[in-house]
Image (cartoon, rainbow, N blue to C red):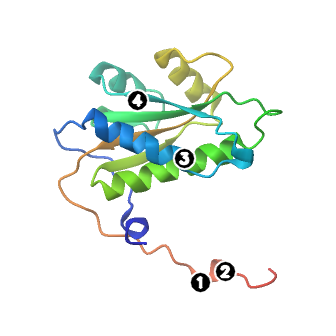
Amino acid sequence: METIYKRRSIRRYIEKEIAKEDLLKLVKAGMQAPSAHNQKPYEFIIVTKRKTLDKLSETGLYCHMLKYAHAAIVIISEANKEKTPYWQADCGAVAENILLEATDMKIGSCWIGEYPNKEKTDKVKEILQIPKDYEVFATISLGYTEQEKEPNNNYYEEKIHIEKF
């Protein structure tokens, strides 16, 4: 539970590269997420080149942290609604696993939601040469940070209903 409470969105990073093995460890953590009907409709693009991260930082209003990131993991899916109707839920679980593992590894991270914004996803597809029949779900911005942020208190009793609304 400690990792869950420590997880925060980190948008500023220090000058320290993330090892390839650590990036693969994050992707492996993502793959441990539950998947509806065990379809596992996700794939990943790991981005570490500064020029590409800079281009991705310009794909939308809330992507600026990629200018400072040392890596990003882009979660994509061959989003066939008939074959994999729950691909968004599966990709969401994958993203959360990556965020939690990054927190556990003391790597700062931030979830950048692209789907269902077609303008944003089309820009990411163009930059990363993603085939048309794939959807971009989200990008996870990654980098080390100088200091940990205090955990949020996201417990709101008024949001809990027992037995009925």
Residue lying at 40% horizontally and 29% vertically, measured from the top left? 46
CB contact under 8 Å: marks 2 and 4 = no
Residue 93 coordinates in the image, percent (x, y): 58, 51
Mark 2 Cα-neighbour bin, 10 Å: few <14, some 14–19, many ≥20: few
SS label for mark 2: loop
Alpha carbon distance from label 2 to label 4: 38 Å
Mark 3 Cα-neighbour bin, 10 Å: few <14, some 14–19, many ≥20: many
SS label for mark 4: strand
CB contact under 8 Å: marks 3 and 1 = no
Question: Of label 2 and label 3, which has the lower sequence position?
Answer: 3
Q: For residue 114, what is the image quadrant? A: top right
Residue 4 coordinates in the image, percent (x, y): 43, 66
In front: label 1 or label 4: 4
Residue tagged by mark 4?
A: 46
Q: How many marks?
A: 4
Alpha carbon distance from label 3 to label 1: 27 Å
The three-letter amino acid code for the residue at tag 2 is: Ile
Question: Of label 3 and label 4, which has the lower sequence position?
Answer: 4
CB contact under 8 Å: marks 1 and 2 = yes
Q: In the drawing, what numbered circle is on residue 33?
A: none
Alpha carbon distance from label 1 to label 4: 39 Å
Rendered view: 44 above or below 122:
below
Residue tagged by mark 2?
A: 160
147 on left or right of 113: left
Q: For residue 100, what is the image quadrant? A: bottom left
Residue lying at 30% horizontally and 69% vertically, measured from the top left? 150
Residue tagged by mark 3?
A: 94
In front: label 2 or label 4: 4
Residue lying at 52% horizontally and 77% vertically, measured from the top left? 155
Residue tagged by mark 1?
A: 157
